[in-house]
């Protein structure tokens, strides 16, 4: 009987001790550094679990509310909408969410080979109509943003608008000259998620790199040919074909291009690497827009 009483008292004592610790310690989080896998991060955040130790359940992403820094677990498509509205951002201090985003949708990233001999030989990216693909872009800080002037020199860089999908408008004039301007924008025909949504350039010294991942899914009305899609090295953009096989894609499906190449804009960062996943490519000799000799 004495043994039973001592056992009961010991259990009660342990229970009282555990109650005096934060819930995060009792659950095995906090100081013993086990990730807290949850679908309700706000509750355990209030119990003392650090944001860096919170991992959302499978198929959910951790997003941090801009107003007060509190965490939320949401589906990837919801995260994209919240980021676009400025509600919050994927936690940049932890790559768990970014890796979750790309790993959930895309595998086996690769760099698209570039033809360095001919300006008009361009890789055209190919996507299936009912598919999801990824682009992973790496930027290198090439100058101090404090030394950069002009509209393209933001302190906090918004990464979503860097990816647009549109056509070019080619016009030939009577004097033999030509003009190439922005045509219709079709970005709204695609579902695009971006992680992270923004980058604070103050956190990156000269020579440092940052990476952005785009997850791209064409909507049912997106089948077609597009002159410009994701950024390409040398200040260009990849042409894109959706819903067509390699043997169905030809130069005539795209606009003429400027023989002088693309114009680079001044900024504190430079695109240094482009990798894609979930899409193929085909090298196409695009048509050069040339001035006609005077008669």
Image: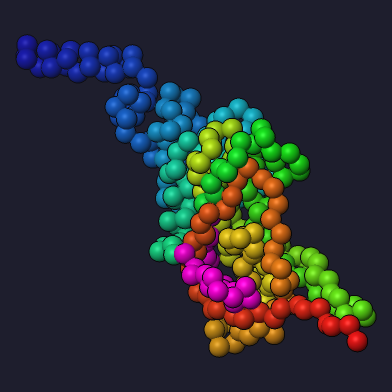
- What residue is drawn where x is 56% and y is 43%? 141
Kindly tell me whether residue 111 is visible in this rendering. yes
- What residue is drawn where x is 76% and y is 70%? 168
The verdict on residue 107 being magenta is no
Q: Nearer the viewer, residue 225 or 142?
A: 142
- What residue is drawn where x is 54% and y is 70%? 116
Question: Compared with residue 185, is residue 51 higher up or lower down, i.e. above or below?
Answer: above
Q: Position of residue 288 (x, y in %)?
A: 71, 78
Magenta range: 111-137
Q: Position of residue 252 (x, y in %)?
A: 69, 85
Q: Nearer the viewer, residue 25 or 20?
A: 25
The verdict on residue 126 being magenta is yes
Q: According to the image, what is the colour scheme of the structure? A: rainbow
Question: Compared with residue 52, is residue 84 higher up or lower down, i.e. above or below?
Answer: below
Q: Nearer the viewer, residue 234 or 166?
A: 234
Question: Compared with residue 134, is residue 152 higher up or lower down, i.e. above or below?
Answer: above
Indicate left or right for 211 with 228 as reference. left
Kindly tell me whether residue 56 is visible in this rendering. no
Q: Position of residue 220 (x, y in %)?
A: 65, 73
């Amino acid at each position: 009987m004495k043994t039973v009483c001592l056992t009961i008292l010991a259990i009660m004592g342990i229970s009282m001790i555990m109650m005096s610790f934060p819930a995060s310690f009792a659950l095995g989080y906090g100081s013993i550094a086990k990730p807290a896998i949850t679908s309700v991060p706000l509750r355990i955040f209030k119990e003392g679990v650090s944001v860096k130790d919170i991992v959302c359940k499978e198929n959910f992403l951790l997003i941090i509310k801009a107003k007060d820094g509190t965490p939320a677990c949401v589906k990837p498509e919801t995260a994209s909408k919240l980021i676009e509205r400025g509600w919050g951002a994927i936690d940049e201090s932890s790559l768990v969410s970014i890796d979750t985003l790309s790993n959930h949708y895309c595998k086996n990233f690769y760099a698209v080979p570039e033809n360095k001999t001919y300006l008009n030989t361009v890789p055209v990216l190919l996507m299936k109509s009912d598919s999801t693909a990824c682009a992973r872009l790496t930027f290198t800080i090439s100058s101090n943003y404090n030394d950069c002037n002009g509209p393209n020199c933001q302190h906090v860089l918004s990464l979503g608008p860097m990816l647009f999908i549109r056509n070019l408008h080619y016009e030939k004039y009577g004097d033999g000259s030509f003009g190439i301007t922005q045509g219709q924008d079709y970005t709204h025909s695609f579902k695009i998620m971006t992680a992270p949504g923004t980058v604070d350039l103050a956190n990156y010294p000269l020579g440092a790199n940052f990476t952005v991942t785009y997850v791209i899914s064409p909507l049912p009305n997106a089948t077609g040919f597009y002159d410009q899609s994701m950024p390409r090295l040398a200040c260009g953009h990849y042409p894109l074909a959706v819903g067509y096989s390699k043997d169905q894609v030809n130069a005539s499906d795209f606009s003429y291009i400027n023989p002088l190449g693309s114009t680079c804009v001044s900024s504190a960062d430079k695109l240094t690497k482009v990798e894609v996943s979930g899409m193929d490519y085909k090298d196409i000799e695009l048509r050069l827009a040339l001035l006609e000799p005077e008669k």
